[in-house]
Amino acid sequence: MLTNLGPTNLWTVRQTKLSTENGFPPPFLPSFPRRSLPKIAFKIWLQRQAINKTELLPDQSNGIAHSRLPPTTPSASSPPHHGSPVGPPLHLLRLRHPLRRRRRRRLLPVGVNWGSQTSHPLNPGIVVRLLNDNGISKVKLFDADSWTLSALRHTGMDVMVGIPNDQLYAMSSKYDNAKNWVRENVTRYVHDGSLAIRYVAVGNEPFLTSYNSSFLGTTLPSLKNIQRALEESGLGDRIKAVVPLNADVYDSASGVPSGGLFRSNIRDLMADVVDFLRSKNSPFMVNIYPFLSLHDNKHFPVDFAFFDGTGQPIVDGGRRYTNVFDANFDTLVYALKKIGAGDMEIVVGEVGWPTEGADNANVASAERFYRGFLKKMAGNEGTPMRPGKMEVYLFGLIDEDMKSVLPGNFERHWGLFTYDGRPKLEMDLTGTGKSRGLTAAKGVEYQDSQWCVMRPGVNDMSTFAGNIDYACSMADCTPLAYGGSCNGLGDVKANASYAFNIYFQTQDQDVRACDFQGLAMITTRNASRKGCLFPVQIVSAGERGAVAGLMAAVIAAAVSLLMMGL
């Protein structure tokens, strides 16, 4: 999170946002009750069987397990739907590449982060079409999932793949691990020119103070090994290894950007990282979150988090700063300058604004932020120290209902799109004011139009708390909390209905998931109310893949039996 030293040090952004995007174990994710394990384990097994049996979805063979689930989250900013599919049905085994048939819309001045900490992933082919329909030509991933990378082939999009933090030890301890990773996750996709991988992100914010130095000893060796493997594969000139870093790696004691220095406990390490990156012509990648500056400091002036404010600017040596993004960025420029790297290229790996989960986390504020930020990017304004074009990736594409809420409930609501790919915001991604707005995902398939709600006539409240707690330990109830879109439901029975339904949907509408000791019932009447969406969950990519894989296996077995009979 961003912490500021006080009202006179408003630009300082010691960002300690907990990141779970790259496999670091989220400390306070609820543990799964024992009785839910068989269902979850079976779903994972089915998904893996489908992937292994489908040529389109090659399994990785590097021996290093993926640590995260793929993309979705219920967002109450989207209107109630009734579970009907949108567009023609898609077939898992033969997804059509949208760019082969459709003209790409105007390319944007920004890329986007495609996270995957969601309980029900959208099919990667659907997400790729969503990216294309919205003119997005650069995408940043947090892993190197084979299904996702296969879907991105032949699209012409610039791709950044990622190595999760929990794999840094393996990458640093043995060069062969890094070599194998590059072969399985980079070379196999780019050798024929079908996928344009531009960066390999080594870890994600590995120097966060919240990680208690867990990755200080493994990040730089991993970076060196991955870059070496890229070079030995003949890819070093066009694919660069980078380290996305949190803005808490630098600070200023003077209260102005020109005082920027790297954090004292990692100053020597940062100098070594920067020296290596510069020697390979690789950029410095940083994540900047103006929202967290505002969220974490009650004295922070609201206007300074946006780009249209009229408050008192910060003046530093003749340079005027009217927003915290510019001040933050230039603090890094000064920190680099002081170690002899003042001309180093900087890429903003993450920047965005959540739509619920806290004060100022709402649709109106998000639209205000993006309106100013995207206009700035389209105009190539840069910052006082670095005027001109910037390379930036918005965070994020789709809400993620499996993210840790340790930093705040807003962590699950950074998406430009809802869990099912519908726009949450009225915004112009081009920043020119000429765009028609965001385009929704096509081909999304929903589960049945049914909801799990509180049974009428139940008055015994003795088991309410325990059942609501259980539901919310297994599903995303953040919209019910303060700052959430469903916080105003007004009574405990309505809150219980929301909790019961979100658990029911997360469990794929299993009838056994709508009981709660007799408190709940299934209804076909839309339970959404008072601006609060009671979602119907999508048919996830994993489920569809499992069904397709099992059907293929059954058909193959039947054909074999028929042939044997003949």
Image (spheres, rainbow, N blue to C red):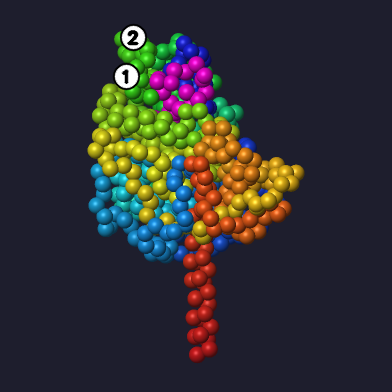
Magenta-tinted stretch: 279-305
Question: Which mark, residue 385?
Answer: 1
Q: Earlier in the sequence, mark 1 or mark 2?
A: 2
Q: Is residue 460 visible?
A: yes
On the image, the x and y values in percent for residue 52 come to: 50, 62
Secondary-structure class at tag 1? loop
Horizontally, is 128 left or right of 120 in the view?
left
Task: Work out whether 226 lies above or below 445.
Answer: above
Q: Residue at x 24, y 38 (%)?
A: 434
On the image, the x and y values in percent for residue 427 come to: 34, 37
Horizontally, is 494 left or right of 80 in the view?
right
* Cα separation between marks 1 and 2: 11 Å
Instruction: Using a 10 Å C-alpha cutoff, classify the residue at mark 1 as few (fewer than 14 neighbours), some (14 to 19) or many (20 or more).
Output: some
Residue 291 in the magenta stretch? The answer is yes
Q: Residue at x 34, y 47 (%)?
A: 439
Q: Residue at x 27, y 25 (%)?
A: 381
Task: Name the residue that disc number 2 marks.
Answer: 317
